[in-house]
Amino acid sequence: MELEIRVYPDPVLRKRAEPIPKITDEIRALADQMVETLVKRVGYGLAAPQVGVLKRLIVVDVEDELYMVANPEIVEAGEERVLGVEGCLSIPGVEAEVERAYRVRVRGLTMDGEEVEIEAEGLLARVFQHEIDHLDGVLFIDHLGRAKRLQLLKEYERLRHSPQARSQGKEKEREKEGVVI
Ligand code: NI
C-alpha cells in the first residue's frame, strides 16, 4: 500500500520521532510500505515522519542498494564537506545546494533486530544525513542561509497555489533531475 506523503508545512515534519524499542511485524510492515511508496515516488530515501509516523525509521534506496534502518544515528562524520543539490518529497518542486559531510558511519538496527554499521560516502552519505535529519524535525531548507531559504519557500508557495506550475514540478520530480530525498 502506497502511503500518503506529508508535505511542508505539515507540523508532523517538525516533530522529533521516538526510538523504536523492538523490531516487530508492525515495524517491518511499515518499512515495506515506505519502500513501496519511495519506489513509486522516485526518491532516494524516506523517513517515517514523512508518512505521519513519529518513529525513528528510515528507508534508503541508492544505486540499487536498499537499506531499512531503525534508530539510525551518525556515529562518525568525516571532516570533508561537500555541496550537492537536494530536494525532498515533503517539499516537492524545489531544490537547493546543501553542504553535508562526504563520509559518515551510520549505526542502527536492521529489520531482523540486528545492530548494523554502514560506511557511507557521496550520495549514500548525503541521503542518510537528510533522512536522519527528518527524524529530528530538521528539513534540508534549515541548512540554507536565511535569504536562500526564504526565496525557496516563496517559490514553493507559488508552486503549491498554481496547478500548472505544480504539474511542472511533478514532471521534474519524475525526471529525477536533482536529488529528491
Ligand atoms: Ni526529505
Image (cartoon, helix red, strand yellow):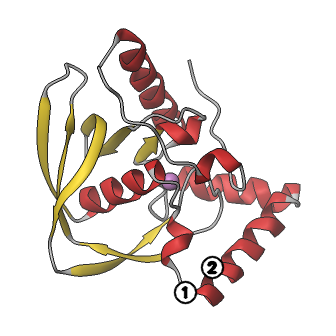
**Mark 2 sits near ligand 1, with its Cβ under 8 Å away:** no
Q: Residues under labels 1 and 2: Cα distance?
A: 6 Å
Q: Which mark is residue 67?
A: none
**Mark 1: few/some/many CA within 10 Å (<14, 14-19, 20+):** few
Residue situated furthest bottom in the rendering: 147
**Amino acid at circle 2:** Arg
Number of numbered callouts drawn: 2
Q: Is residue 149 left or right of residue 41?
A: right
Is residue 96 visible to us here?
Answer: no
Circle 1 — which element?
Answer: loop
User: Would you name the residue on which mark 1 appears?
Assistant: 145
**Residue 150: % across, % down:** 70, 81
Above or below, comparing residue 153 to residue 136 in the picture: below
In-front residue for pair 155/173: 155
**Amino acid at circle 1:** Gly
**Residue 21: % across, % down:** 31, 25
